[in-house]
Structure formats: structure tokens, C-alpha cells
Image (cartoon, coloured by chain):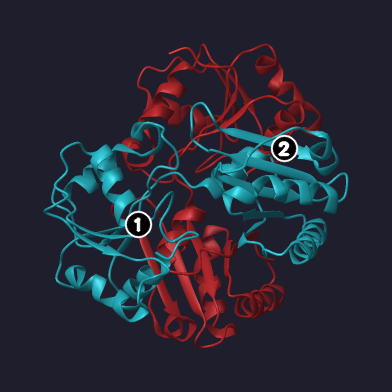
Chain colours: A cyan, B red
Amino acid sequence: MSLQPALYLLPVSLSNAPIENVLPALNISILRELRVFIVENLRTARRFLREAIPGFDIDGSQFFELNNHTDPAAISSFLEPLRNGIPTGVMSEAGCPGVADPGAQVIEIAQRENLKVIPLVGPSSILMALMGSGFNGQHFCFHGYLPVKEPDKARTLRDLEAESARKDMTQIFIETPYRNNKTIELMSRTLRDRTLVCVASELTDPEKEQIITLPASAWRRKKYDFDKHPTIFLLHAR
Amino acid sequence: MSLQPALYLLPVSLSNAPIENVLPALNISILRELRVFIVENLRTARRFLREAIPGFDIDGSQFFELNNHTDPAAISSFLEPLRNGIPTGVMSEAGCPGVADPGAQVIEIAQRENLKVIPLVGPSSILMALMGSGFNGQHFCFHGYLPVKEPDKARTLRDLEAESARKDMTQIFIETPYRNNKTIELMSRTLRDRTLVCVASELTDPEKEQIITLPASAWRRKKYDFDKHPTIFLLHAR
């Protein structure tokens, strides 16, 4: 296989599930050919490559790190190999690059310069949570992180709930994992009894995955512990 | 492999790309074991199964059709096999079930009855378009179809643009394929010059895929023909 020069957007695993559970074979054949990578986290990218392709030539590969510590002025230079015709991969720390990660910045530059961008199939916790929730998938919104402070977060939750009821839409957000339980607790006492809350945790993990949809009132009584487990939150008000 | 009883949410191809380009091997092993399916379209589901697994026992399988013509009162009965411990698959006409298709209705019932729901990885045109656009993936909203009539659609486009600028968010929507060109034309003269418009067409197709991001003003001058090609539209205003 000789790869056409393009920016390949390569999803990576969300869990310890075997690679063949979550990535199409095509992704592995493309990874095998790549020697230039723009990655959110150097260490996890290398670990992923070693796991996906035993014996992968890490030392013969070039890595650019693109995350919140990257100098914005440097990002464009990461595309220099691609400008010279060398296929380049983009990898997030988990899931799909360009979605809830800093990767979009380099994809934006590639688009501006008319460089070919090829997204590949892979696990997205946002999308899989939406699928599993049973909520409206014809109209949904992902908000990233909510405000950290509790009064602000409670107000935002009520705003999202009101908008969900008004527009029949699904609201999706994330939380830093050590605050998951507190966030569920806050939702259960802030939202209306009948508003449905879905908690989707450890997606794609064959043992630990949980996708639970219950009315806010039922979460109030339920026992749970999602702290430190990667989790997506969804709500749908009626 | 003996499959645990669950509702398996099985993505299907978006294009004529080989199955191994877009589905993990796990999906095929699960499909192989299933004999009960809830599908959006009987004919395309059977064709997909035959293609994914040559020799698949279509005649020995049970299919329930769930689409806009299905009697809502009948949907719950589709879960009768699963209630009796028989693993059941859900398949959309294209892409991921539960997202922009009627599948969410049966997933909602499964969640209400505490039946296990397991989403699998596969191609989602919404997500792949978002990845490839270079737009903000930390905050995005999918709106399904916009209003059909041109004045309403133009007003909605301006509202989405204003919200996108105000909240720094990506707006995503779809259109019936024979109206794609008209919609781009409408966007190019309705939106502000600098607003970025991404048109993502024939996703996952090795030959026909196109993901093009340009300012509205550049779409005004560009030649294109996306009519009858499955396409996702995205906009981001600054």
C-alpha cells in the first residue's frame, strides 16, 4: 500500500479493549505506513502505536505534540512534512481527533491550505453515549465541560434542561473524572424529577462499560460510583 | 463466542467502501451470532448482512422494521426476544443507529426496562464531518434537517450563524440530497463573507469523499455539484 499524501485523522482506543474491537483493519494498515504524527500526548501515542502494531518503528518516526501547552505559532510548522508530500497522522489522547481535543487547530490550517484531510472510523465516547442513551439523536448538542463552581454549574444545568424541553434536544457534556459523583448528585437535586439523565461510563470496555438512563428522581435514590472512570453525561427533558 | 443477551447497536456502512475500512472485526463476530434484528430498512439491512458475512442465514433470522411507518404501539414487542434472553441487533439504514434515525425509540424502551444496551464502533457521517471540518469540536450541535421553505431556511441559517459566533460553536445539519446544491447556494448568499462553511460529502468512499471548508464568500465563486450525494453541512462563524 502506498499512502496518498493527506492528514489522516486516526481515532485511538478509549479503553483497554483489544484494538480489533474498536478500530477497522484499514486504520491499522494506514498506521503501519505513517512515520509522521501530530499527537495530543507523546507518551500515550507511542504506547498506542506499540500496542496496535507490535514492533512499530517509533524511533524512526517523527512526533509533534499538540495540546494546551503548544505554542500556537508553532502549529503550522507541524504540517511541513505534509506540504512536502509526506502523509501525516493526527491522534488524540483518546477517541477521535478534532472532537473535544486540540487537534482541530491543525486540521483547520490544513483545510485553509487545501491539504487533503481524511477522517477514519473509530470510537467516540460522545457518539457511543448518545447511541446508548435512547435520547433524541436527531437533535443534540455537545457542550464540553460545564462551569466548575457549583452555583454556576447548577444554573447551567437548569438552562440546558429548559432548552432541551423547549427544542426536544439531547444535551451532552463531560466532567473531570474525579468530580463525576458530585456532578450526578448535583443533577439529581437540580433537575426536574422526570428529566432523564444518562450516565455512560468506561465506553467500549468489555467489563466496565455502563450506560444507564434514569429519571433525575431515580438517580437521587441510586447507589453509584463513577469517580475516576471516564464518563459522559446526557440529559433529556420532556 | 457466546453472546450475552443485550441490544447491540450495530453501525452499517455509509458508502461502498469495503467493510474492513469502516467496521472493527468485533462487529462482524457479533453480527455472525445474531439472529434477531430491528432494522430501519429491511432490504438494505439484508443486503448489508449478505455483504458483511457471505452466506449469512437471512432466512433463519427474524427482522422487525422500525422506521417512520412503524406503528409506535408495536415497537415494544420488538424487544420480546431480548426479554427472553435472545441477543438482538439494531441497524440503521446507514451509519450509527440511534443517531438521526428512528432507532432511538427502541433503545429508549430497552433503557426503561433496564435491558443491557451495547453500542458498537462504526462510521458516523456527523462525527467524521466534524473531525474533517477543522471546526470547534469542543462545542457543537447537530440540528437534523432545516426547514424546507427558503425564507424559513435562510432565517434559520442566520440564527445558527449568530449562535455560532456568540457561543463559539459548530453548527451541523443535513439536507435531502437533491437539494444540496441549492442549500450551498443559499448559504453562500445568506451567511456573512467570513463565516466558514464545510461541505462533507460521500464520507468513507475511497474515491468520492470530499471535505471542503471555505468562507461563505468563496463558496459563492466556487463550482460544485453535490446533488444526490449524501452530504453533511457545517458552519462556524467568527
Q: Is residue B136 left or right of residue A167?
A: left
Query: Residue at image x 55%, y 17%?
Result: B4
Residue A130 in the image: state x and y as whole percent: 61, 45
Query: Which badge, 2 or 1, comes first in the chain's sequence?
Result: 1
Label of residue A87 in the image: none
Query: Residue at image x 69%, y 22%?
Result: B79
Mark 1, residues whose alpha carbon is within 10 Å: few (<14), some, or many (≥20)?
Answer: some
Compared to A155, does B111 lie above or below?
A: above
Query: Residue at image x 59%, y 83%?
Result: B190
Q: Which residue is mark 2?
A: A213
Query: In this orientation, does residue B102 appear?
Result: no
- Work out how far the residue at label 2 is from the one at label 1, CA to CA, in angstroms: 33 Å
**Element on which disc 1 rests:** loop
Residue A209 in the image: state x and y as whole percent: 56, 32
Of the pair B40 and B198, the residue shown nearer to us: B198
Q: Quadrant of residue A181?
A: top right
Q: Which residue is mark 1?
A: A41
Compared to B34, does B172 lie above or below?
A: below
What is the three-letter code of the residue carrying label 1?
Asn
Query: In this orientation, does residue A78 appear?
Result: yes
